Image (tube, rainbow, N blue to C red):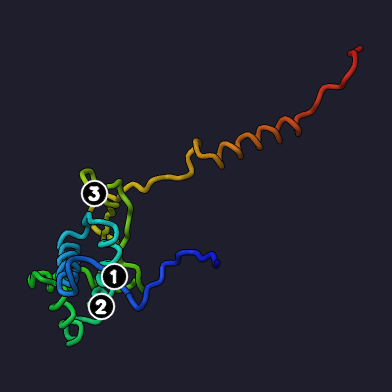
Amino acid sequence: MRLSVAAAISHGRVHRRLGLGPRSRLDLLRNLVTALVRHERIEAPRARADEMRGYAERLIEYAKLGDTNERAMRMANFWLTEKDLIHKLFKVLAPRFQPHPGSYTRLLQIPNRDGLDRAKMAVIELKGNPFPPLIRPRRDTEKTLINQLLKGYRQDMQKAAAPQPPKGTPV
C-alpha cells in the first residue's frame, strides 16, 4: 500500500473556471475590466479580481503604446464593453502609467461577504486613483504572539543587564 499526498494538479488548465463556460467567463472578465477602467476601484470576489488583474494590466501595457497602434486599439475595443472608455484609457490612464514599468493595480483583501456563500472578497484598484487610500490591516500589533514573546525577551535581557546590588550586608 502506498501513501500519497493529494496535490493540486492542473492538467493543462491555465486559468480559473469562472461563470458557466468559456464565453461566460470572457464576458465576466470583460465586464470587470470595464468597471475597473470606469471606476478605478471595484469590489469583487477575490478569485475574479485576481483573475481579472492580469488582463487589466496587459490592457494598460497595450494602451501605453498609444492610440495609433492598431493592436492596442483592437485590444481596447475587445476588453472594454463601453466604448466611451477607450478615450479614458488612452488619454488619462496611459499617460498616468507611462513612466511605470508595470504593476498598475493593487489588490487588497477585505472581509468575507455576508450572506449564504461567505465568499472571500477583495478590492482591486488602479494605482494613482483619486480616492483616499485604503487602510491595510497591520499584522505587527502588540497582541501578536511573536511580539509578546519579543517583549518578554527584552524585559528579561534588561533585568539581566541591570546592575545588581552587592549581596551581603551593607556596611
- Taking the spot 25% from the left edge, 62% from the top edge, the residue there is 48
Q: Residue furthest right?
A: 171
- Taking the spot 21% from the left edge, 56% from the top edge, the residue there is 42
**Front: mark 2 or 3:** 3
- Residue 38 vertical placement versus 63 (above, below): above
**First along the sequence among labels 3 and 1:** 1
**First along the sequence among labels 2 and 3:** 2
Residue 1 vs residue 132: left or right? right
The amino acid at mark 3 is Asp
Dot 1 crowding, Cα within 10 Å, few <14, some 14–19, many 20+: some
Quarter assignment of residue 90: bottom left
**CB within 8 Å, label 2 to label 1:** yes
As rendered, which of 140 and 4 lies closer to the eye? 4
As rendered, which of 21 and 46 lies closer to the eye? 21
The amino acid at mark 1 is Phe
The location of residue 117, given as percent across then percent down, is 23, 49
The residue to which callout 3 is attached is 117
The residue to which callout 1 is attached is 97
The residue to which callout 2 is attached is 64
The location of residue 28, given as percent across then percent down, is 17, 66
The amino acid at mark 2 is Lys
Q: Secondary structure at mark 1?
A: helix
Q: Secondary structure at mark 2?
A: loop
Q: Quadrant of the N terminus?
A: bottom right
